[in-house]
Image: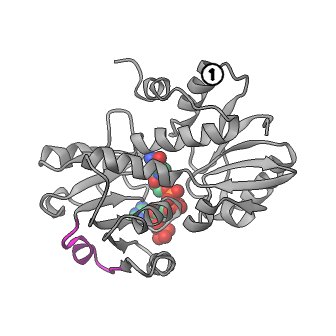
Amino acid sequence: MNPSRLVLLGHPVSHSLSPTIQTAALRKAGIDLTYEAVDVEPYMFSDCFARMRDENVAGNVTIPHKTSAFSLCDSLTQRAEHVGAVNTFWVEDGGMVGDNTDVVGFDNAVQVLLGHVPYKENVVLLGAGGSAQAVAAAVADWPGSKLTIYNRSEKSARALAMRFPDNACVELTLPKALEGGTLIVNATPVGIFDDVHPVELGALPKGAAVLDLVYKRGETSWVRGARGRGHRACDGLAMLIEQAAAAFERWTGMKPDKDVMWEAAVGPA
Ligand code: NAP
């Protein structure tokens, strides 16, 4: 497809490690492309996405544009259709193609966290936006697993649950949602810029694993605190690297060096 350049479209976007890890992988592979973060306010997204198509730009979409990108693409991969959100795009025959690599990123991160392929999990999902949609799509394929969605706005929680009626339900209070949870997933931006916890540490169900899609150098306060109380816990860095590697392959036809991506993300020891 030979894109003219690569971008990450989001708002806010300055916290993202994607430019660092993609640039490291591009340099390692000897590919002469740039990958830059572009802050796009929601009211500008549609115009911006059309310009990307005209200029043969490929890239990623992050908070809060994943569902808008889904509606604006000319065609979608099967995975993006299933999820209802787009995090990776490129131009083919003049049309914008949307894909979703968050599902494989989430799946791989959970397998590392749990130490096995997920099976009969009782997943509590905080949030109902673009990344929550990828989580719900992944959980729908886990044998015998249930998904309970808790979100600050009931409407988007219900809309998400309706897409996965066989295994998803909505709870309107957090304590009820947490009951019996075996894997608690934060898919809200809570904790990105401060140390606020999406769930009080003392309220986490006993023995539950914790996965925070938010990531930071040195992990999030929630993840560190949960681990300190004996929970298996990890932040969103593993998912970020895995979804980035899958996107890199889509754009370049080459597998990136994931070790180089990890080194770039974690920084010097
Ligand atoms: P999004 O589409 O904007 O959805 C955000 C969700 O969080 C919505 O359900 C929203 O609720 C809820 N929310 C927003 N602010 C909140 C607050 N202050 N308190 C409680 N709930 C709040 O965003 P997204 O793309 O899903 O991203 C969510 C987070 O996941 C971001 O931090 C992003 O960086 C992270 N993420 C990480 C990875 C990774 O690879 N590690 C991948 C994707 C996303 P309403 O419905 O009420 O608006």
Q: Is residue 234 visible?
A: no
- Residue 45 part of the magenta segment: no
Give residue 85's quadrant in the image: bottom right
The residue located at (56%, 29%) in the rendering is 256
Q: Residue at left 49%, top 60%?
A: 134
- The amino acid pointed to by label 1 is Ala
Q: Residue 241 location in percent, x, y?
A: 47, 38
Label 1: few (<14), some (14–19) or many (≥20) C-alpha neighbours in 10 Å: some
Compared across the picture, whether 6 is left or right of 172 comes to: right
Instruction: Inspect the magenta stretch and tell me whether residue 178 lies in it.
Output: yes
Q: Is residue 239 above or below residue 42?
A: above
Q: What's the magenta region?
A: 170-181
Residue drawn at 67 percent across, 63 percent down? 70
Q: Secondary structure at mark 1?
A: helix
Location of residue 92 in the rendering, given as x and y in whole percent from the top left corner: 81, 49
Circle 1 is placed at which residue position?
29
Residue 40 on image: x %, y % = 68, 50
Could you tell me which residue is drawn at 64 percent across and 31 percent down? Answer: 254
Q: Is residue 176 left or right of residue 145?
A: left
Camera-side residue of 196 and 134: 134
Q: From the Cβ of disc 1, is ligand 1 less than 8 Å away?
A: no
